[in-house]
Image (cartoon, rainbow, N blue to C red):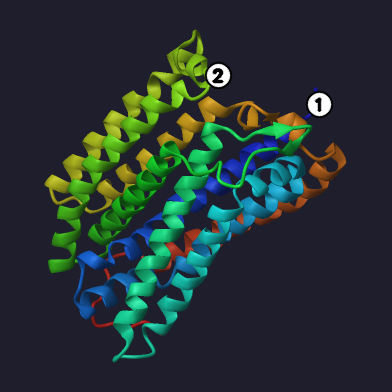
Amino acid sequence: MPIDLPTIWAGIIAFAVLAYVVLDGFDLGIGILFPFFPARQERDLMTNSIAPVWDGNETWLVLGGGGLMAVFPVAYATVLPALYMPIIIMLLGLIFRGVAFEFRWRTQRASHYWDYGFWIGSTLAGFTQGIALGALVQGITVVDRAYAGGWWDWLSPFSILTGFAVVVGYALLGACWLNLKTLGAVQDKARKLAKGLGIAMLVLIAAVSLWSPFINPVYFERWFGWPTAFFSALVPLLLAVCAFLLWHGLTNDKHLQPFLAALGLFVLSFVGLGISFYPYIVPGSLTIAEAAAPDSSLMFLLVGAVILVPTILAYTGYAYWVFRGKLDPEEGYH
């Protein structure tokens, strides 16, 4: 039986994208939450909580983007022209937040300006990621395996909705991370914020989920046609379980449970996208098989991925293990 290399690679890239969203999502959420924590001491504590891991979290973005270019070059050449503007803004936001993260420690007098930069960069990055996702879900015009749409096709009411949903979701992850890593006033404030953000996140998930099936007949058939409807029904059921665990954890002074439940909301939303998309990599235009590079290239790259992905997972897991537990407010960032 031949190995289905395109599907294997689609799974690897999907995993890389999901790993980026759940790992970099909470540290982007820390920046998004900055306006709710105005005191310098609070913001120092928040940035200290992500200082050991935030750079490594962005490794997955490089793997996902680079892998898409190498493994699915047709999809890369189609999607990138359609999303030039949001992707450029996202990259500028990530660069600006990285600079602001470092520079806010180098000055006392002007640190609040860099705090604004960290907040703006984090929010822009999250919002444009959501817009890019929404634009991909609503469909990209492809003619003769090339993008044939307009410069502003990515901007629509649906993509703006998904942009807000991602920002709120990242803020929820950030609040749950602070609940996990801090104590005292910062943890109390983060827990209160997480309750409101959790409700907002569920409302936005419901809005996007109810809108999506009517954008494309393929989505409608996947979610409401038989037999896929049986599997699709499990997603909202599991979302309800995660929502209950999130609320239960926040109201009963649990620390790890709310964070894991918030991650579960993202993972299940990602699974829902997979149900809607598969076997397309560019919805309605290009399937995984149509967009893939030759099998010889896929096999060559797979050898590297078999080594690289476990290595990244190992050092990421080690970093989180080393810096586990509650944050000491007396320790600074160096």
As drawn, is 165 to the left or to the right of 77? left
Q: Residue at x 45, y 22 (%)?
A: 213
What residue does disc 2 label? 218
Q: Helix, strand or loop at disc 2?
A: helix
As drawn, is 115 to the left or to the right of 295? left
Task: Residue 61 in the image: state x and y as whole percent.
Answer: 57, 56
Quadrant of the rendered structure where residue 5 is?
A: top right
- Which residue is nearer to you in this view: 9 or 320? 9
Quadrant the C terminus occupies: bottom left
- Which residue is nearer to you in this view: 276 or 51? 276
What residue does disc 1 label? 2
Q: Residue at x 31, y 57 (%)?
A: 174
Task: Residue 189 in the image: state x and y as whole percent.
Answer: 15, 61
Quadrant of the rendered structure where residue 100 is?
A: bottom left
Task: Residue 298 in the image: state x and y as whole percent.
Answer: 79, 42
Q: Earlier in the sequence, mark 1 or mark 2?
A: 1
Q: Is residue 199 above or below residue 314?
A: above
- Which residue is nearer to you in this view: 191 or 224? 224
Q: Using the rendered image of the protein, determine whether residue 94 is visible from the camera's viewpoint.
A: yes
Q: Amino acid at mark 1?
A: Pro
Give the Cα separation between the discs numbered 1 and 2.
28 Å
